[in-house]
Amino acid sequence: MSDWRCSPNLTPDQRLEVLDLLNRTEIAIGREAIDEGRRRTVIHGGPGEHWLSVVDQRVRGYALLYAGEPASIEMCGGGTDEPLAKEVLARHGIVDWWIRDARHEGRGRVVRTLQLLRVALPIQTTPAFASGFQTREFDPQRDIGRWLEQNNAAFADHPEQGAWSERELRERIAEPWFDPTGFIVLDAGDRLAASCWTKVHELHPDRFGEIYVISVHPDFRGRGLGRRMVTEGLDLIRRRGVASAVLFVDESNRAAQRLYHSIGFALEREDRLVRFGPD
């Protein structure tokens, strides 16, 4: 009999146990135990199927499933579990499963590969922006709506980045790690042409930076703005005394891959989204 049980919500005690499990796992494996968005679901009590493996009245395993067509799931630690897979497939029939930092073997079909790239700092700078463009710090009082329009247009077909809501943006702005000096936007007259949001992982033993969100509005593509915004973001990270920075990019995004590798980024790991269904 499986130890896995599903709940639509976590009790306060379960939430604390799950967060403790995530934290201990991160220390053990040296990377994030679960996607940031799913961790935030645990913290803030967002919607989802919370799968718990409880042994001797303690939470020994955790996974979070988001409903969809198909549903998607990720386990604490980024692996798989056969008993959990049987339980989940009995409910959903088809499910996409994130497998982090590992080569996929066995059944299932890889439907997406997400790459983590890293670059040492500092990097070589690029020429200044052309006239008519001006960078400045993101201003929550005036830029929330404008940034949502710019970023969501840039990622209109992206599964995660193209559907930001005002609530989600405000929640992230309220996070302890948020630093407005690390979030720059590019003005083109009265429009936002591009933006680069950076993050420093202050509590990680290696204290590294991240290009958290980088985007160029479709109306302003083809002018080299993406390269310039990335290098501006990396300089912001460097000025905080950080020696390296990372970003995530889809393996299938060839244009972004060429840009990042030309700047000096190199592959560090690959995460795969594997679709499981009836045999």
Image (spheres, grey):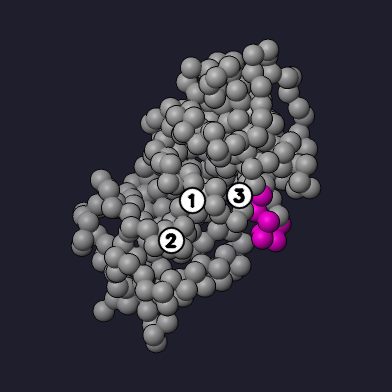
Q: Nearer the viewer, residue 90 or 22?
A: 22
Q: Is residue 16 left or right of residue 132?
A: left
Give percent across and percent down for residue 126.
Answer: 73, 23
Q: Position of residue 270 (x, y in %)?
A: 52, 47
Find out whether the residues at labels 1 and 2 contact each other: C-beta distance under 8 Å.
Answer: yes
Task: Check the picture and name the quadrant holding the N terminus.
Answer: bottom left
Which amino acid type is shown beneath numbered disc 3? Phe
Query: Rounded to the nearest whole Å, what is the CA distance between mark 3 and mark 2?
Result: 17 Å
Q: Is residue 89 above or below residue 253?
A: below
Q: Is 151 left, or right, of 116 in this rendering?
A: left
Numbered disc 1: secondary structure: helix
Q: Residue 128: percent from the left, percent from the top? A: 73, 19
Decide which of tag 3 and tag 2 comes sooner along the chain: 2
Against 23, is 163 above or below?
above
Q: How many numbered marks does the figure carry?
A: 3
Q: Which disc, if any, is residue 178?
A: 3
Q: Are marks 3 and 2 in contact (CB under 8 Å)?
A: no
Extent of the magenta region:
200-206
Task: Identify the disc placed on residue 171.
Answer: 1
- What residue is pinned by disc 2? 44
Q: Nearer the viewer, residue 72 or 107?
A: 72
Quarter holding the C terminus?
bottom left
What residue sits 50% from the left and 54% below the top? 36
Question: Which residue occupies 69% across, 31% down?
Answer: 232
Magenta span: predominant SS is loop
Q: CA distance from mark 1 to mark 2?
A: 10 Å
